[in-house]
Structures are given as C-alpha cells and as structure tokens.
C-alpha cells in the first residue's frame, strides 16, 4: 500500500523522508536498509545534522545496504562502500561492525551473494530506504529480475550505466557492467519502505511503480504488493500520476 506525499522541492522531500526515518529510529535496536544514489543524500544530511545537534545515537543501529558494483575495490571513490561512508556513516558515528555492504571485489561473487543473504538471517529491516532508476529498477534489480530473487548478481542495463556515467567522468566504459544487489524478495521482507524520487526524468518510472501493471519488466511495481510504502516525490516526479 502506498502513502504518496508530494512536496515542493528536494529539501522538503528530504525532510519528509527524515520524519519517516525518525519514527524507525525510535525502536530499541533499529535495523535499516540503505540506498545510494543522489535521491537519499538529503535524508542522510538530515540524519547527520540530527546526530551532531541532538546526539541521536547510532551505536545500536544495524544497517544493510542494497547493492554494490562488481569489479571495483571498496577503496574506489565510486564504490557504494565509499559513498555510504562519505555521505552517512562517517557523520553519524556508527561502528563499522554494524554496517553491511556487499563486497563487489571478491573472487566468488555467488558465494558473496549467499553470504550477504545469510548475514541478514534473524534480522528484519524496519525501514528500507529506496530510490528508483529511470527504468524502474530498485537496488540494482533491473527489468527482468525475478520477483522471487534473493541477493544476486545482476548485469546492468545500458540505460542504467548511461545514467550512472556522470559519476565516472561521463565515460560509460568506466561504469561497471555488473552489480551485487539485494533481490526483490529480500527488499519485500522489510517492514516498511520509504522511496524518494525527484524530477521529471523519474516520472515514467514512478507511474509504472504506482499505476502500472505488476510486472518484472518494472521491478518497482512489486511494491504495489507491500503493506507499507511511503513514496515521497516532488511535482516533477509526480507529474504523470
Ligand atoms: N543502485 C542505485 C539505485 O539504488 C538508485 O536508486 C538509482 C537511482 O539513483 P539516483 O537517486 O541518483 O537517481 O541509481 C542506482 O542505480
């Protein structure tokens, strides 16, 4: 079930997402699912400010990230490990032992997928943060990924690699071709989801997710079956609803 909230600009969208996050953080030992991309950066900035100004404690918070590129080391400036440390973890004083990001620099990627899924056993994500790709992907579950998928390897679509080339000197050849991602079934296990999308280039994907047919061709459409999804949009992203 979607709770759709439309705000005027990115700052308001981020603040609204932060309010949802604050509710999740009230739990005793909160478990968060986290996302990369530009969409959640404002939310993360609110969390950092709140930690610094109000002393919100992250020492008991556990996190699992959605995904990671395959073939680049964690130290690479565009790895999602680096992204999360620069945009959130370093600013909230969360111990590294509490955070989980799949490793994309291992020899046996299938074993890494299984180990990542296993690491979540016994934990349920209280709040999963999501963005959405222009092709309707969530995490790195590209169109065609199975609704039953657990953490798995994914070949990235040309469109996604084009979209993400801006982080790789605008050179698509530098964008990794594969990623490890939580599966759609993994994401669906979370208790609640907050999905952030802004600007008109997300409008088609947002329409597909909320009003489109539930189909593996639009991975985000599976969220129509989830009981608790807050979707926070600006006018551009909401323009086709
Ligand atoms: N794997 C990430 C997704 O988790 C993210 O939601 C998407 C949208 O990114 P952005 O928020 O920058 O538009 O991009 C990447 O491909």
Image (cartoon, rainbow, N blue to C red):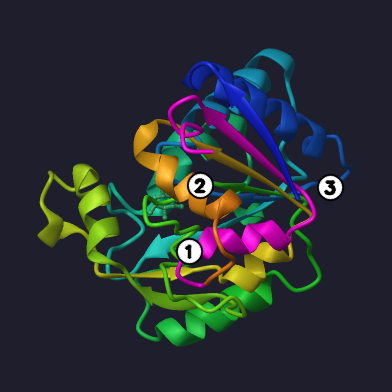
Q: Are marks 1 and 2 in contact (CB under 8 Å)?
A: no
Nearest the eye: 188 or 136: 136
Between the C-alphas of marks 1 and 3, the distance is: 33 Å
Write the residue at 49% across / 78% down: 152
* Label disc, if present, on residue 218 of the rendered structure: 1
- Residue 238 among those drawn in magenta: yes
Residue 59 in the image: state x and y as whole percent: 73, 41
* Label disc, if present, on residue 29 of the rendered structure: 3
Residue 70 in the image: state x and y as whole percent: 33, 70
Q: Secondary structure at mark 2?
A: helix
* Side of 29 relative to 136 (left or right): right
Assign the C terminus to one quadrant of the image.
top right
Mark closer to the chain start, 1 or 2: 2
Mark closer to the chain start, 1 or 3: 3
* Side of 77 relative to 95 (left or right): left
Q: Which residue is mark 2?
A: 207
């Amino acid at each position: 079930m979607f709770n759709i909230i439309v705000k005027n600009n990115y700052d308001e969208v981020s603040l609204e997402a932060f309010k949802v996050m604050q509710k999740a953080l009230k739990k005793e030992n909160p478990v968060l699912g986290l996302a990369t991309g530009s969409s959640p950066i404002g939310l993360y900035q609110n969390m950092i400010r709140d930690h610094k100004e109000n002393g919100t404690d992250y020492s008991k918070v556990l996190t699992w990230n959605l995904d990671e590129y395959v073939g680049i080391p964690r130290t690479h400036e565009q790895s999602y490990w680096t992204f999360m440390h620069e945009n959130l973890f370093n600013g909230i004083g969360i111990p590294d032992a509490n955070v989980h990001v799949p490793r994309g620099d291992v020899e046996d990627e299938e074993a890494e997928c299984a180990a990542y899924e296993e690491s979540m056993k016994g934990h349920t994500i209280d709040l999963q943060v999501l963005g959405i790709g222009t092709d309707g992907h969530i995490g790195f579950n590209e169109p065609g990924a199975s609704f039953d998928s657990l953490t798995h390897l994914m070949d990235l679509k040309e469109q996604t690699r084009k979209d993400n080339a801006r982080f790789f000197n605008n050179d698509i050849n530098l964008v990794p071709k594969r990623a490890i991602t939580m599966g759609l079934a993994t994401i669906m296990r979370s208790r609640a989801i907050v999905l952030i999308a802004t600007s008109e280039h997300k409008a088609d994907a947002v329409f597909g997710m909320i009003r489109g047919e539930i189909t593996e061709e639009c991975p985000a459409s599976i969220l129509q079956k989830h009981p608790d999804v807050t979707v926070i949009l600006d006018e551009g992203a909401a323009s086709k609803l």
